[in-house]
Each structure stands twice: as C-alpha cells, then as structure tokens.
Image: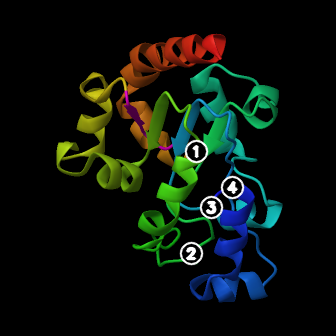
Amino acid sequence: MTTIEEIKQHIITDPENKAFTQQGWQPIFMAYPEATILIIGQAPGIKTQEKGQVFRDKSGDRLRQWMGISEDTFYHSKKIAVLPMDFYFPGKAAHGDLPPRKDFTAKWHPPLINCMPNIQLTILMGTYAQKYYLNSQAKRTLTKTVFSYQDYLPTYFPIVHSSPLNFRWFAKNPSFEEKIVPELQQLVKEILNQS
C-alpha cells in the first residue's frame, strides 16, 4: 500500500468493512500528499455517510469558521486532510451514534499518515481522537484537555467537536471561542501561508 488510492481500495475490500461496502458506502475521509493540516474527528454521521463527503453539515461550517478558512480552501486546496476515527457510520446507539470501532484507527491511520509527509499540525476534535492520540497525556476531561492546548503544540491542537449538539458546552465555555479559536486561526493561517 504505497498510495492513498491504493489504501482506499484496501479499506473498501477489507472483510471488516464488507457490510458497509455491500450497502454501497464509500469510506469517508480526505487525504492528500500535499496536506499540511490534519483533522482527526470521530466517525461520520449517517447524513455525512449518505453525502459521501466529510463535514458537509453545520459541524463543518463551524469548524471552517474556527479555522478561519473558506469552504474552497477546505475542500480544494489539498492542504487540509480529514481522518475520522472510523471511516464509516457505525450505527445508532440509544443516545446518539455508536462509537467508532476500536481497532479501525490503528489499522488505517498510520499508512494514510505516512502518505502525508508535510503535516505540520494535527487538530484532535473530540474525546475519541484526544484519548487515542494523546493517550496518557490527555487530561481528565475533554474541557481540561482543550483548555490545555498549549501543552500539545506544535504537534497537536485539541478542540471540542463543532457539532451543534454541543451547544451547552459552548454556552458554558465562551472563552473557547473568545480566546482559543483566534489562536487556532492564527496557526492555521501561518501554516497555509507557508505552503
């Protein structure tokens, strides 16, 4: 597996993804050799899965706003990559969606990341991504991890998920958008201007 397209074909034909492939679902991720910023999220929701493209929703609108970039830059510059923790909608739980499958990230993220040697910043969006990539360095809560973002720079920038369902968190933590988002925007701008 030496190219992103080859890896994608392996994902599609992997027996562990057979049920999804049989439904006609494609793996949902975005990766380019030229990418300089990587976003790691959770798993696509059903609407995203059906649309076949990452962040074509209100979560994506807010994420692009937080990053200070246009839709065109996000989708067409080839500088932004998105690897969810699972590339398929995992199904519904009693409350919300099921979590990403546990072994998916370990199997498919490393070969894809190896195809993107120019990544300068990885944005870790939400608890699943932060616990996996920060491991024991993650704080006790998502909020503490997010507000300790400087501890993880220059490699990682942990943020809360941009889903509208997090409106209570946004209301309780207004300083995230007041103080941390401008720092993220500045960092994103510097990286994109260099490349």
The answer to whether 45 is drawn above or below residue 66 in the figure is: below
Place of residue 177 in the rendered image (x, y in percent of width and height, measured from the top left): 47, 21
Q: Residue at x 47, y 78 (%)?
A: 94
Crowding around mark 3 (Cα neighbors within 10 Å: few <14, some 14 to 19, many 20+) is many
Crowding around mark 1 (Cα neighbors within 10 Å: few <14, some 14 to 19, many 20+) is few
Place of residue 71 in the rendered image (x, y in percent of width and height, measured from the top left): 78, 30
Is residue 27 among what the camera can see?
no
Residue 44 — which label?
3
Q: Nearer the viewer, mark 3 or mark 4?
A: 4
Front residue (pair 2, 171): 2
Highlighted magenta segment, given as a residue range: 155-161
Contact check, label 4 and label 2, Cβ < 8 Å: no
Separation of residues labelled 2 and 1 (CA atoms): 20 Å
Q: From the image, which quarter does the N terminus lie in?
A: bottom right
Element type at mark 1: helix
Query: Mark 1: which amino acid?
Result: Pro
Q: Nearer the viewer, mark 3 or mark 1?
A: 3
The mark tally for this picture is 4
Residue 13 in the magenta stretch? The answer is no
Q: Which residue corresponds to mark 4?
A: 3
Query: Mark 2: which amino acid?
Result: Pro
The answer to which quarter of the image holds residue 87 is: bottom right
Q: Earlier in the sequence, mark 2 or mark 3?
A: 3
Residue 90 — which label?
2
Q: Which residue corresponds to mark 1?
A: 164
Q: Earlier in the sequence, mark 3 or mark 1?
A: 3
Q: Residue at x 33, y 55 (%)?
A: 132
The answer to which quarter of the image holds residue 37 is: top right
Separation of residues labelled 3 and 1 (CA atoms): 15 Å
Element type at mark 4: loop
Q: Earlier in the sequence, mark 2 or mark 1?
A: 2
Element type at mark 3: loop
